[in-house]
Amino acid sequence: MPKVSYSLPDGTVHDVDVPCGQSVMDGSVRNNLPGIVAECGGSCSCATCHVFVEDGQSFFDEPTDEERELLEFADGVRPDSRLSCQLILTDDCQGVRVTVPDTNG
Ligand code: FES
């Protein structure tokens, strides 16, 4: 099962096993980690699931136009910014590390 490492705004790091087919957002919300708010529940319409993907962009499909447009409204966007509800885990996703910004609320 893919393991995702979440670096949270408080400086803590949480390693979580997330089943294939679930998103990076699911893994955070289902384990009650703070920082990924996911207001829209994963339908790519809120941008409160913003994360930075470290070394891992290639694990995931390229962002859709919809995701790119939403990210324009997120605070603190960087080149490695993604919406974590759009990052679906597969068996190839070993060692995914994401950083959760403190601006998702
Ligand atoms: S949960 Fe709303 S855009 Fe990802």
Image (cartoon, rainbow, N blue to C red):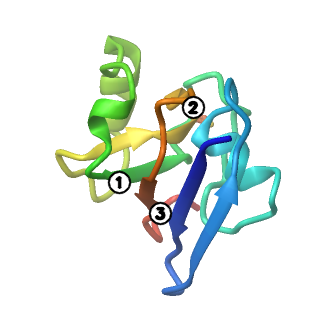
In the picture, the disc for residue 100 is: 3
Q: Report the amino acid beneath label 1.
A: Phe
Which of labels 3 and 2 is toward the front? 2
SS under mark 2: loop
Mark 1 neighbour class, 10 Å CA radius: few under 14, some 14 to 19, many 20 or more: many
Q: Residue placed at 61% from the left, 43% from the top?
A: 2
* Residue 85 as seen in the image, left or right of residue 82: right
> In the rendered picture of this protein, how many numbered marks are placed on residues?
3
Q: Nearer the viewer, residue 21 or 104?
A: 21
In the picture, the disc for residue 52 is: 1
Q: Residue placed at 81% from the left, 63% from the top?
A: 32
Q: Nearer the viewer, residue 15 or 62?
A: 15
SS under mark 3: loop
Q: Position of residue 3 (x, y in %)?
A: 60, 52
Asked where in the image residue 76 lies, by quadrant, the reply is bottom left
* Residue 64 as seen in the image, left or right of residue 23: left
Q: Assign the N terminus to one quadrant of the image.
A: top right
* Residue 95 as seen in the image, left or right of residue 31: left
State whether residue 66 is above or below residue 21.
Answer: above
- Mark closest to the chain's N terminus, 1 or 3: 1
Q: Residue placed at 37% from the left, 19% from the top?
A: 61
Quadrant for ligand 1? top right
Asked where in the image residue 26 lies, by quadrant, the reply is top right
Q: Which residue is mark 2?
A: 89
Mark 3–mark 2 CB contact (< 8 Å): no
**Residue 93 appears in the picture as rendered:** yes
Q: Position of residue 28 (x, y in %)?
A: 69, 54
Q: Report the amino acid beneath label 3.
A: Val
Q: Report the amino acid beneath label 2.
A: Leu
